[in-house]
Image (spheres, grey):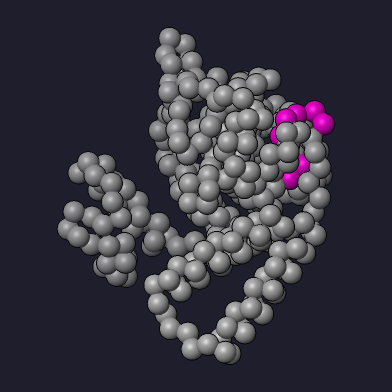
Amino acid sequence: MKAIKRFLLFVTVLLCITIFTSIRETKPLIYVQHEVRQQIDHWIDQDSSSIDRQLAIPKKQEFAINNIQMNMSKSDVENKLGHQKRTTTSAYGTTWYTYYDKDYNNFIMVSYIKDRVNALYTNQNLISSKSKIKYSTPKDVVRNRLGEPIDYIKKGRFRFQVKSDEYDIFHKGYIYTTVFYDKHRSNGVTALLQVSENMENRLRRQYGPPSKSLEESFELQDFDLVNTERKQHGLNTLKYSGQVSDTARKHSINMVEKNYFDHNDKEGRSPFDRLKKTA
């Protein structure tokens, strides 16, 4: 409600300026427009969906996602969230169950071992915690409340470095918690992944063994994550296209074979050029 009041106040001021001032699209004005849009997005993120749901402070675990916690039974999850919208293969050799309402609202991914929650993920404003960490909480606040993140994960004789500027991994209570930050929005929390030690130890290396099932699952997961991000920021969601997926896959293979990373290929063709060619 506060976000709506602020937005209406901003619109009123802008209308007054428009009526009494001749406005030109100058660089300073464009900059101000950009900053205002970002602030409105921030207000929306803080207050989004508060009417539709109440995020309770978890009692058993540090974090909850849409009131779902680690080690919860599958039956309890489905009583709260209903039937999954999609199932895909995870890198841990288990299955991701994807739940959301209608057009990617209240998005959460859950993976089970013996019908108990052993992994959770969301990139929407569904996070609650005992430490009062939630969506958009700044990185320095997260570290102040959770302590120092780990630098590596040990698997057998190997240590895999996990340090990054874009996320922190915390290891506590037999759970690995990865907190992702949005560097374009003041390094605020933008997503949360929790994986049990039992689940993590299924991986003997840093990544899961390649397979056709895993490849197809990653593609569908990427598609879902793009849509959930768009939904979180008030943009229209996308429809799946086999043609677009095939074009993107070929470009990924091309980058691997020619050892580069760019939206444009070595021939200078943009994604739109490549799509036109296959149309």
Rendered location of residue 112, percent (x, y): 67, 32
194 w.r.t. 229: above or below: above
Q: Report the span colored magenta.
A: 59-67
58 w.r.t. 126: above or below: above
Q: Who's the residue at 42% across and 14% down the image?
A: 158
Residue 21, magenta (yes or no): no
Q: Who's the residue at 32% across and 66% down the image?
A: 272
Could you tell me if residue 202 is visible in this image? no
Between 115 and 235, the residue placed more toward the observer is 235
Quadrant showing the C terminus: bottom left
Quadrant showing the N terminus: bottom right
Rendered location of residue 73, percent (x, y): 77, 32
Quadrant in which residue 198 is drawn: top right
256 w.r.t. 241: above or below: above
Between 271 and 13, the residue placed more toward the observer is 13
Quadrant in which residue 157 is drawn: top left
